[in-house]
Amino acid sequence: LGSGLPLATHTLFHEAGLAQLDLFAEEGVDLSRVCIGHCDSQPYLDYCLRIAQRGAWVAFDNIGAQLGRLEERIVWLIKELVARGHQDQVLLSHDVGQKPELSYFGGPGFTHLTRKFIPQLLSAGVPEGVVTKLTVANPKRFLAIS
């Protein structure tokens, strides 16, 4: 509360991020310093919009874990958030923390985001400047200590 530090949460396969925002708001936390994690595991536009509309960050931070059609949906979600003016509140990352997720063991590894996912965003029509914002400027702003 009032520390100026960023606050990142962990949510998987449910809309707990909304309840987290309620709790943080009750405690007086600046929601613009809150990042709701793993929104890619709850890939619904309404959910992501409700987070962004409250001023919090929407993190697609499990990129590579949802290959194929679900990853295409995440590309679509990001395009929709950008089209609706929320490009300043989107963060991208991957969650590589176990041996099977490493490329050496057949997983997507640490390069999936840059080698596979970003080209998908560009091919889908997300402008290069917006991609740079999502991958460079936004993390820099979120992680800055005020």
Image: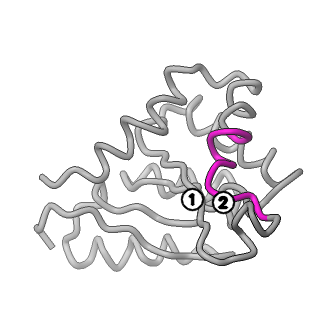
Does the magenta segment cover residue 137? no
Furthest residue in direction right, as rendered: 69
Instruction: Identify the mark nearer the N-term, 1 or 2.
Output: 2
Instruction: Check contact, mark 1 vs mark 2: CB within 8 A.
Output: yes
The crowding category of the residue bearing disc 1, from other C-alpha atoms within 10 Å (few below 14, some 14 to 19, many at least 20), is many
In the rendered structure, which segment of residues is drawn in magenta? 107-117
Frontmost of labels 1 and 2 is 1
Q: The residue under label 1 is which amino acid type?
A: Asp
Instruction: Residue 28 in the image: state x and y as whole percent.
Output: 19, 71
Picture layout, residue 129 above or below residue 139 = above
The residue sitting at 72% across, 48% down in the picture is 74
The crowding category of the residue bearing disc 2, from other C-alpha atoms within 10 Å (few below 14, some 14 to 19, many at least 20), is many
Read off the residue under disc 2: 40
Kindly state the secondary structure of the residue where label 2 is placed: helix
- Image side of residue 94 versus residue 21, left or right: right
The residue sitting at 81% across, 44% down in the picture is 72
Picture layout, residue 78 above or below residue 98 = above
Q: The residue under label 2 is which amino acid type?
A: Asp
